[in-house]
Image (cartoon, grey):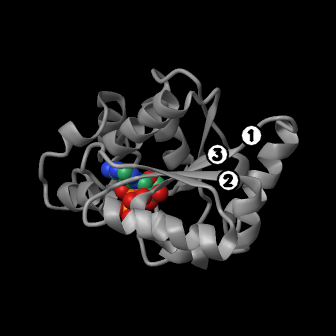
Amino acid sequence: MFGGSFNPVHEGHKALVRRMIEEFSLDTVYVIPTFCTPLKDNTPMITPSHRLNMCKLAFADVSRVTVSELELLRQGNSYTVDTLGEISKLHPNDELFLIVGADSFMQLPLWHKAEEIFQKATILTIARGEVDCQKLLAQKALLQNEFNAKAFVLEEPVVQVSSTQIRNLIATDGDFSRLLCKEVCEYIRRNGLYGYGD
Ligand code: ATP
């Protein structure tokens, strides 16, 4: 499972999913846009259906990925523990993995029912920006000791880009086209998202 606000989805998300599929031989990755993110409620959000559509466009050329509406259909706060429960019902005999970026990995103990998340899934993460491998390995040890969590850390970061950076570029008429796939760029322009064209 790979959840996120995907506001908008970008090349970092795609590179992360590709890397995890390759490194851990994952059979399927569910990419799941959140309806609303409990720890991120100050971020300007566009409609869930736009975020979902962009995810579908972005991951159309990545095999083994299913873009899922599970959290959008449930509405309200998106709790990963509930989504993992739904996925394990769909795949009762399979091992579950939760893919998170480095910033999310550092926040995991704050997540709703964190202990239950660690019982349900092995966590996969990767260095990103200021959260380097050392910090991740220290956090991995803490999660193991305090929660008996299983986690794997990849040291080599993928593309350094964030949705915030893209939203800021669009708002200031900057060039954001290299940070997103062509189809998502066109979608943003066509729908005037994030103030494009204002
Ligand atoms: P924002 O800038 O709005 O906070 P974001 O770029 O972090 O957004 P999210 O949709 O919040 O994107 O990301 C979903 C998940 O993907 C999070 O766990 C995040 O850490 C991870 N992620 C996002 N971009 C990258 C990247 N470039 N490298 C590694 N992980 C990433």
Ligand 1 appears in which quadrant? bottom left
Callout 3, which amino acid?
Phe
Q: Position of residue 131 (x, y in %)?
A: 31, 65
Residue 120, image quadrant: bottom right
- First along the sequence among labels 2 and 3: 2
Q: Which residue is at 41% across, 63% downward?
A: 136
Q: CA distance from mark 3 to mark 1?
A: 7 Å
Q: Secondary structure at mark 2?
A: helix
Q: Secondary structure at mark 3?
A: strand
Q: Is residue 128 left or right of residue 4?
A: left
Q: Position of residue 138 (x, y in %)?
A: 43, 70
Disc marking residue 64: none
Disc marking residue 97: 3
Callout 1, which amino acid?
Glu
Q: CA distance from mark 1 to mark 2?
A: 24 Å
Q: Which residue is mark 1?
A: 95
Q: Position of residue 102 (x, y in %)?
A: 41, 60
Q: Does mark 1's beta carbon lie closer than 8 Å to ligand 1? A: no
Q: Position of residue 137 (x, y in %)?
A: 42, 63
Residue 7 visible (yes or no) = no
On screen, residue 146 above or below 50: below
Q: Is residue 146 left or right of residue 14?
A: right
Decide: marks 1, 2 in contact (CB < 8 A)? no
Q: Which residue is at 53% across, 20% downward?
A: 63
- First along the sequence among labels 1 and 2: 2
Decide: marks 3, 1 in contact (CB < 8 A)? yes
Q: Which residue is mark 2?
A: 72
Q: Is residue 121 left or right of residue 132?
A: right
